[in-house]
Image (cartoon, rainbow, N blue to C red):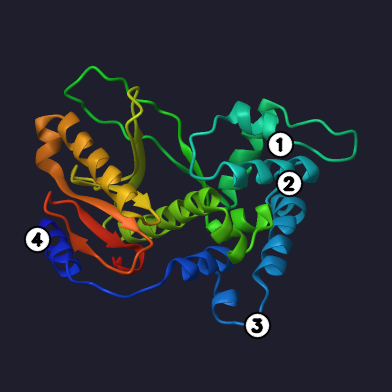
Amino acid sequence: MQTRQRNLCKEMQGALGGPSVEKYAQLIVRGGWPELVNDDVADPSDYLESYLDDIARTDLEAAELRVDPLRMEALIRALARNVSTEVSIARLAAEAEISGNGGGSVSYRSARKYLDALERVFVLEEQPAWSVHLRSKVRLRVHPKWHFIDPSLAAAALQTSPQALLEELTTFGFLFESLAIRDLRIYADVHRGRVFHYRDSSNLEIDAIIELRDGRWVACEVKLGGQKHIDRAADHLRQLSRKVSEQRQAQLQALVVLTGGEASYTRPDGVHVVSLGHLAP
């Protein structure tokens, strides 16, 4: 695996081409659903909004999971607004506003139950926090991040479009991160790996830690683009590499900034800048 990883990184140094930022906006809204991938005419918003409605009103009932469709829909919207973040269940419950029918929000207990239900029907995935030995006494934060099984579901819940994403880069950035996590999970699974995230009490945050069963790991930051953002991400990755124990340093395979750019290369500091479109298992 180590040799393969190094060879892969070497190959990526000269990689060029791939999706543009505009294309990524389209891919996020469309998603990886075969029916949409194979049909250029299909309207992703119609298809996915209907799917979300079916989840709340049909799929969960078929799985013998009792939910209030209005409260489930409100929670899904709250999840979409907070995708790729460490939002607490209490905050999700408070943000799950119900329009009409007396209004109100979702209780903490219902939110926890509904989140579990969405995971059981493979709509939602939790990205757990990474547990690691650090050199310093900095404390780790252990809240998970939340991702839909495909970021297009978040886009549908937000009723956004590719053009709207290009005009709202903050939302675009969170959904692009979720797209990257989706792909990293697929590729990590080839090597029986898992994808975590990292954050400590100094607010050092790393978007993705890919860890294999034997302890080898790769740290990834996800950025749409922009040299300043890439430089900052690379600095965060190097900070993490200095914080872990000597044993964990020896198990580190690569530091990677995943981008929406069209070029992949290795920086002088050893950090790999990789276009998301150039990843492969």
Seen at 73% across and 46% down, the residue is 73
Query: Which secondary structure lies at badge 3?
Result: loop
- Residue 150 lies, in percent from the top left, at 53, 58
Is residue 210 in sight in this rendering? no
Figure check: 246 above or below 152: above
Type of the residue with mark 3? Val
- Residue 112 lies, in percent from the top left, at 62, 32
Viewer-side label of 2, 3: 3
Q: Is residue 75 left or right of residue 198?
A: right
Sequence-wise, the earlier of marks 3 and 4 is 4
| Quadrant the N terminus occupies | bottom left
Q: CA distance from mark 2 to mark 4?
A: 47 Å
| Quadrant the C terminus occupies | bottom left
- Residue 38 lies, in percent from the top left, at 55, 81
Type of the residue with mark 4? Thr
Query: Which secondary structure lies at badge 2?
Result: helix
Viewer-side label of 1, 4: 1
The numbered dot on residue 73 is 2
Figure check: 174 above or below 138: below
- Residue 180 lies, in percent from the top left, at 40, 56
Q: Which residue is mark 1?
A: 96
Figure check: 94 above or below 212: above
Crowdedness of circle 3 by 10 Å Cα count: few (<14), some, many (20+)? few
Seen at 23% across and 72% down, the residue is 15
